[in-house]
Amino acid sequence: MAAARRARAGDPRAGFRRAADEQSPAVPQGLIRAARKSGQLNLAGRGLGEVPQHVWRINLDTPEEAQHNLSFGAADRWWEQTDLTKLILASNQLRCLSEDVRLLPALSVLDVHDNQLTSLPSALGQLENLQKLDVSHNKLTSIPEELLQLSHLKSLLLQHNELSHLPDGFGQLVSLEELDLSNNHLTDIPTSFALLINLVRLNLACNQLRNLPADISAMKSLRQLDCTKNYLENVPSELASMASLEQLYLRKNKLRSLPELPSCKLLKELHAGENQIEILNAENLKHLNSLSVLELRDNKIKSVPDEITLLQKLERLDLANNDISRLPYTLGNLSQLKFLALEGNPLRTIRRDLLQKGTQELLKYLRSRIQVPDDTTSPNEEPPVTAMTLPSESRINMHAITTLKLLEFSEKQAAVIPDDMFNAVRSNPVTTVNFSKNQLTAIPPRIVELKDSVCDVNFGFNKISSVSLELCTLHKLTHLDIRNNVLTSLPEEMEALTRLQVINLSFNRFKVFPSVLYRILTLETILLSNNQVGSVDPLQLKKMEQLGTLDLQNNDLLQVPPELGNCETLRTLLLEGNPFRTPRAAILAKGTAAVLEYLRSRIPT
């Protein structure tokens, strides 16, 4: 109560201007009484157009005033009250905050995000105990200079406003650890940012920055820097000295080359997709050997240098939608690589069906080619798509079966798989089956004959309405592709597929998440986009400790359970195209880590 008494001494009548507000129905008196005891008041989502006066003066009552004030019940004992330390006013219709906010000097958390604020009161500068201020998703055009007096402020969230400039003295906020300025109209950053030596996370995404000040390199504690969607053409070389940097987001800029980062020994993630990068400089790659994620999709890269193999900790490499025509076979030596995206490249040395088999099969193929010189291609290698003709013409591709261990009958528009195909297998152990792009309405029963060898099965782009029990006997199956069919459910017997790692069920007709998938604990990737799934069970998903990729785009999810944020093994969570309202699109655009963090913050405590 000491802080409240100090505030009261300055103005004994402060906050009494509108007595009518004392009984405002918008704020139940039970909440006020509870807040006096807990020190926390949550008024989020109550349709408030302004903050009732008795909220500002919640700690100003004395015993003498109590008898005149209806908001102070007889059962409340004033000497046991706690100063208000946390006030949440989020998701209301507030257009301004009263200067009376100074009457709550003990506040450590003030959350007014998602309102209609166009300015902030200068009195905020008097809240010397404030540690977190969230004024995101408003209409702020400027920040009062007084705000820079908050020397204990650790978290300042200003994203989704209309800020075009920041005060020059911004660096006075020396205690800041988290600063989010994304989705504003900033064209430059004050050089005083160099003084923010305790800053750990800085988000500058979705502004109009054309360059970053070299002084930013003085932020020795910075671990995450997000500059997504600006107009950056280069990154200052001084950035290379930021020894604590772990995550760097440079997507959707105008970069022509990767930044040189020789001293960023802790850098784990570099996201530079949707730029204009044409060349991967071998020298640059040498300094990135701590990376686990390198995202370069949607650039103009023409080739991948052999030095990519120096990135031995790499787990995700995204090179989709570039101009790459060949890959170094040594890429297969990246032992930690779990995800390799190459779609949308004019690759000439790798068959299309091989690209569809998944990362591990592709890496295995690349490793097998390391000993073969590039200019000595065997006459039977990589048969063209036309090599397999109809069995009725007695031209079954025995080379594919015996050498590549591939049984392929795709793009034939066939309603059934001819018996000649299965007969041709005989005693040859086939590991891959590709029956995609036909008119199959059921899974061929003879698939069971391959149960002791087949690992990868593709039934995509057919008209299959159910998964047969024969398929459930393929106990060595690791990859199953049944996308673009008419499935509505999966049989419980699929639980027997104890080696299954990847399943693609996109573009089917599932209305519920297939419950059997929760029990296949080896699954690493579940692709379920473009269905009609209405909900998922986060507690079941959390038990799937191998699950790294979950694609639920374009479904009917009306809400995303906050507990999904506890599925911390997820490296890729795709939720776009669903009818839920939160998380907002801006949060989804930040990527999986940000979405999971947001969801965790919404878990009721």
Image (tube, rainbow, N blue to C red):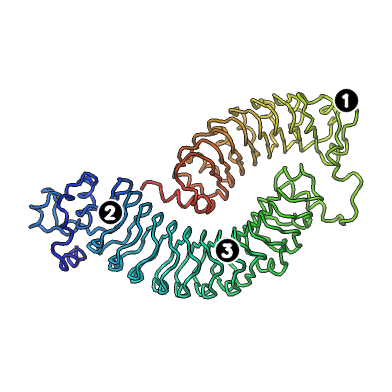
Q: Is residue 391 above or below residue 300?
A: above
- Provide residue 373's location: percent of width, then percent of height: 87, 57
User: In the image shown, does 522 or 258 lie closer to the viewer?
Assistant: 258
| Mark carried by residue 194 | none
- Lateral position of residue 577 relative to residue 59, left or right: right
Real-space CA distance between mark 2 and mark 1, rounded to the nearest whole angstrom: 78 Å
Q: Residues within 10 Å of mark 3 (few under 14, many from 20)?
A: some
| Mark carried by residue 392 | 1
Real-space CA distance between mark 3 and mark 2, rounded to the nearest whole angstrom: 42 Å
Q: Residues within 10 Å of mark 1 (few under 14, many from 20)?
A: few
Instruction: Name the amino acid, label 3.
Output: Tyr
Q: Which residue is mark 2?
A: 40
Residue at 44% x, 70% y: name it. Answer: 198
Instruction: Name the amino acid, label 2.
Output: Gln
Residue at 62% x, 36% y: name it. Answer: 506
Q: Is residue 491 above or below residue 341?
A: above
Indicate the secondary structure of the residue bearing disc 3.
loop
| Mark carried by residue 231 | 3
- Mark with earlier residue (3, 2): 2
User: In the image shown, does 144 or 594 lie closer to the viewer?
Assistant: 144
